[in-house]
Image: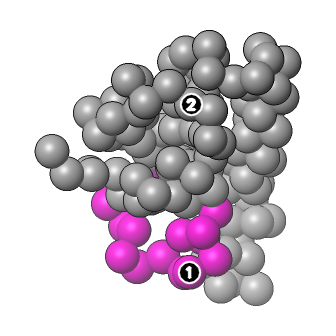
Amino acid sequence: MSHTGIFATAAECASKVGENYDATGWHEANINQWCAEIESEVNVLTGYNFSDNYATLNEDVKKILTLIESNYAGIHGIMFNMVGYTSRIEAEDMVNVLWASMQLNLDLLKDPSSVTFMRGET
């Protein structure tokens, strides 16, 4: 099976789970599912289909989408099974950092002034 995510590569997603993740849950089928979910969520939350228009996007916007998708996949990879982490708190801290960053960037994509800037209309 090959990676089907649009916004982030499998390697970009893998970089977010850290070294203590559970490899039994970190496989292409799960990563593809998590990526498809966040791509749909981003498109609905922003009211714009970034997936269909990805090739036309500015490189800065693509990086924001990469960050959102890789963080989301990382969260799910960590949450799949926390047993490998040195403590549950270590895993939860990683999830909190990824979530905060993901949420900040989702908010940017929803903010009208950011959208105007990203589309080069200013």
**Where is residue 21 drawn, in percent x and y?**
56, 31
Residue at left offset 29%, top offset 40%: 28
Q: In this view, does 18 lie above or below 62?
A: above
Residue at left offset 63%, top offset 77%: 60
Residue 56 is covered by the magenta coloring: yes
Residue 10 in sight here: yes
**Where is residue 70 drawn, in percent x and y?**
55, 49
Graded by Cα atoms within 10 Å as few (under 14), some (14 to 19) or many (20 or more), the crowding at tag 1 reads few
Asked where in the image residue 88 lies, by quadrant, the reply is: top right
* Front residue of this view, candidates 58 and 115: 58
**Where is residue 67 drawn, in percent x and y?**
63, 56
Residue at left offset 45%, top offset 57%: 11
Q: In this view, does 13 lie above or below 89?
A: below
* Front residue of this view, candidates 104 and 21: 21
Question: What residue is disc 2 on?
Answer: 21
Residue at left offset 37%, top offset 67%: 53
Question: What residue is disc 1 on?
Answer: 59
* Front residue of this view, candidates 15 and 46: 15
Secondary structure of the residue carrying numbered label 2: loop
Q: Is residue 45 above or below residue 56?
A: above
Seen in the image, is 97 located left or right of residue 80? right
Secondary structure of the residue carrying numbered label 1: helix
Which span of residues is magenta-colored?
Answer: 47-64
Q: Quadrant of the C terminus?
A: bottom right
